[in-house]
Image: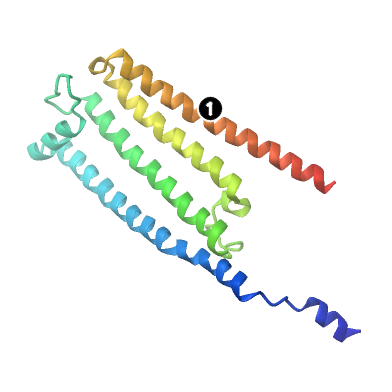
Amino acid sequence: MKLHETNLSAPKKIHPLANLIFMSRWLQLPLYLGLILAQCVYVYHFWVELSYLIGAAMGNISSLQHLLDAVAVPGAVKPTTLNETTIMLVVLGLIDVVMISNLLIMVIVGGYETFVSRMNLENHPDQPEWLSHVNASVLKVKLATAIIGISSIHLLKTFINANAYDAKTLIAQTGIHVVFLLSAIAIAYSDRIMSGTQQSSKH
């Protein structure tokens, strides 16, 4: 009886072709490593821009000139001092970098966990809350939400310099942001329908 139970619990041998296809998921590993390098570039860029902001606040002329050139909008009057609007635009740029960095983390960690291999972080104290129930649908909703946040930052930067843009540009950027928002709602609604269908089929 015990021998019979042992045979039943023994894993089935995977066909070599199926095993090769399954192992092909590791081809995604260089892609995620490349995104980690992109994350390093964003970290470096963040600290460079932050150093310019601190330098400009301390009275460094070259740092101030760099920031004024960075936030200058074609067609608008270029600021000459580190005023509130300039600081706001620089800080929004830093927030934009952070949000894109968050997006990268979700793609790297969530994508690797979903499509490549388990990380076995169940007992790790720093495991992200969303990673405990991550799947392809949850990852799509998280990514869509992050993209909306990034789009909001860019739209806010445009509205701060609204006088430098024509009405067509403002309407186009607002329309694109609304499309992102509706897409995220559609993805979340589709995920809800699929989850409800799966639960109904189980019962």
**Is 112 drawn above or below residue 100 in the view shown?**
below
In the current view of this chain or complex, which residue is farthest to the left?
61
Using residue 76 as the reference point, say whether residue 125 is left or right of it: right
The total number of labels drawn is: 1
**Is 120 drawn above or below residue 58 in the view shown?**
below
- Determine which quarter of the picture holds residue 192: top right
Residue located at (26% from left, 34% from top)? 90
Residue located at (30% from left, 36% from top)? 93
The quarter of the image holding the N terminus is bottom right
Name the foreground residue: 127 vs 118.
118
In the current view of this chain or complex, which residue is farthest to the bottom?
3
Using residue 161 as the reference point, say whether residue 22 is left or right of it: right
Residue located at (37% from left, 17% from top)? 171
Residue located at (57% from left, 30% from top)? 185
Q: Secondary structure at mark 1?
A: helix
**Is 175 drawn above or below residue 18 in the view shown?**
above
Q: Position of residue 12 (x, y in %)?
A: 72, 76
Using residue 180 as the reference point, say whether residue 60 is left or right of it: left
Using residue 108 as the reference point, say whether residue 140 is left or right of it: right
In the current view of this chain or complex, which residue is farthest to the right?
1
Q: Position of residue 27 (x, y in %)?
A: 46, 64
Q: Position of residue 47 (x, y in %)?
A: 25, 48
**Is 147 drawn above or below residue 108 in the view shown?**
above
- Determine which quarter of the picture holds residue 56: top left
Q: Position of residue 88 (x, y in %)?
A: 28, 29
Q: Which residue is mark 1?
A: 182
Identified by mark 1, the residue type is Leu
Q: Give the color scheme: rainbow, by chain, secondary structure or one colour.
A: rainbow
The residue carrying pointer 1 sits among few (fewer than 14), some (14 to 19) or many (20 or more) residues within 10 Å by Cα, namely some
